[in-house]
Image (cartoon, rainbow, N blue to C red):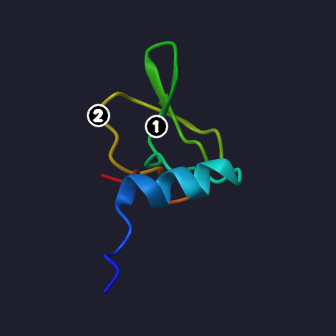
Amino acid sequence: MASAPSDDMFDQFLADRGHETEPARWDRSYNKLQCPECGALHSQGASTCSVCGWLPEV
């Protein structure tokens, strides 16, 4: 019986085809957090985007 592919193999397969494999996180703009979805700027303590509701992946 064949074993299941590892997560690393699956991530490499997706990356080779142009897909993002890293968890979505805040972008940085000077000393602010910037939402990667809408570009809104937030203070360092923000946990969600107050403009579009985006949540960073943990």
Residue 42 higher or lower than 48, as above or below: above
Q: CA distance from mark 1 to mark 2?
A: 11 Å
Disc 1 residue type (three-letter): Trp
Residue 42: give x, y in percent of width and height.
46, 34
Residue 28 or residue 23, whichever sits in front = 23
Residue 51 seen from this side: no
Pick whichever of labels 1 and 2 is earlier in the sequence: 1
**Which label sits in the foreground, 1 or 2?**
1
Residue at 47 percent across and 50 percent down: it is 49
36 left or right, relative to 50? right
Counting other residues with Cα less than 10 Å from the Cα at mark 1, is it few (<14), some (14-19), or many (20 or more)?
many
Residue 1 visible in image: yes
Q: Secondary structure at mark 2?
A: loop
Amino acid type of the residue that numbered disc 2 sits on in the rendered structure? Gly
The residue lying at 59 percent from left, 57 percent from top is 14
Dot label at residue 26: 1
Tell me if 49 is positioned left or right of 46 in this view.
right
Report the side of 18 relative to 22 (left or right). Answer: right
Residue at 34%, 62% in the rendered image? 6
Name the spot of residue 24 as percent of width and height, x first: 47, 48
Q: Where residue 18 sits in the image (x, y, percent)?
A: 70, 50
53 or 9, which lies in front?
A: 9
Q: Is residue 12 left or right of residue 47?
A: right
**Circle on res. 45:** 2
Q: Which residue is depicted at the point 66% across and 49% down?
A: 16
- Secondary structure under badge 1? loop
The quarter of the image holding the N terminus is bottom left
Check the image and report above or below for 52 versus 5: above
Q: Which mark is residue 56?
A: none
